[in-house]
Image (tube, grey):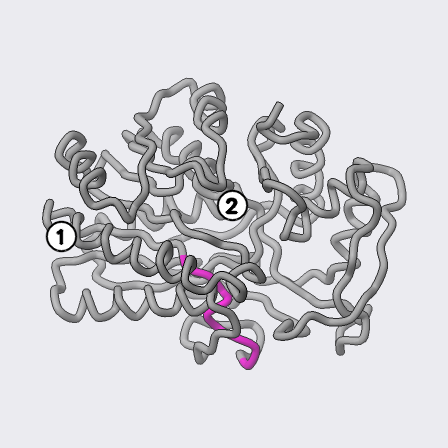
Amino acid sequence: MKKILVTGGAGFIGSHTCVELLNQGYDLVVVDNLLHSNPKSLKVIEDITGKSLRFYQADIRDSKSLKAIFEAEKIDAVIHFAGLKVVNESSSLPLEYYDNNVSGTVTLLQVMKAFGCKNLIFSSSASVYGNEAPVPVSEDSPRSVMTPYGRTKLIVEDILTDLFSSDDDWNIVMLRYFNPVGAHHSGNLGEDPKGKPNNLMPYVTQVALGKLTKVYVFGGNYDTKDGTGVRDYIHVVDLARGHVAAIQKLKDQSGLSVYNLGTGKGSSVLELIQEMEQVIGTPIPYEIVDRRPGDIAVSYADVTKVQKELGWRAEYDLKRMCQDAWRWQTQHPHGFAE
């Protein structure tokens, strides 16, 4: 299993995963429609690794393009990142999210089946657990979604479960991410939001750089150590290495598996801000505002299963996450747009 197709490989998590895969000697084909990513990230991947990949600009909803790629490349396995991912936006654009994330995945699966490629790693999310799961959150916790984005992930998980039930020749690993942050240690590859960031870490770094005025902290009266929400922040490089471990699982003809990818530890919003202040040496202005509907107080992963079955564990702590995110932000204040 050497040739891997990475959908959405020009994006934040996809690009970092491509670096780790190339470093492990895999042959990579990337497909991305570049709607929310930049092709410059692909050049950076090759610069970092000293290795090349093949890129196709295409949409996973376009079966004709996908068939041409599979015909040309003889793909062994697929890592599927492609899709829309802004949680709040999904509530105002539900049809777009179902079309991209669900219909696009179905089209991809149909093409994979037609070409006899039945090895898949799916980029799922801890958002499938909703707001009722006890912490730490284990893989067998009840699923309950709060947003169209989360529902697209849950629906695809169900589709994959049904697919495997119908044909056990498939090998599928579903990875539920917690909160990816950080950047490659080179400072040349990182999270590059278009417009105002939706995620906490790039918002914090842009405030620290002076591009934004202050961080808005949603909720200061949760039942937590400092009143702010607690999340499981995981370094994107650790997350990427989790996908390399998952490929090894596919090689074992493993059937259908699901794993959390997190650190198993929770950090509050204020702890992240304070850690970044320590890294840069200056205060970061913030304001505590009302909670957002659907937000929960505490969420962090139970990582027992992934450690036992894949031999994977997160290595980088919150300080390293902040250091790498800040290095990327300062070296590329305008992201790849430079």
Q: Residue at x 45, y 40 (%)?
A: 35
Residue 144 percent across, percent down from the top left: 47, 78
Q: Quadrant of residue 122?
A: bottom left
For the N terminus, the image quarter is top left
Q: Is residue 127 magenta?
A: yes
Residue type at tag 2: Asp
Q: Residue at x 41, y 51 (%)?
A: 83
**Which mark lies nearer to you, 2 or 1?**
1
Residue 16 percent across, percent down from the top left: 48, 37
Seen in the image, is 274 located left or right of residue 245? right
Q: Quadrant of residue 335?
A: top right
Q: Residue at x 48, y 74 (%)?
A: 145
Q: Which mark is residue 113?
A: 1
**Crowd rating for badge 2 (residues with CA inside 10 Å; few <14, some 14–19, many 20+):** many
**Crowd rating for badge 1 (residues with CA inside 10 Å; few <14, some 14–19, many 20+):** few
Q: Between residues 317 and 18, which one lies in front from this camera angle?
A: 18
Q: Which residues are magenta?
A: 124-132
Q: Give the spatial CA distance, label 2 vs label 1.
A: 30 Å
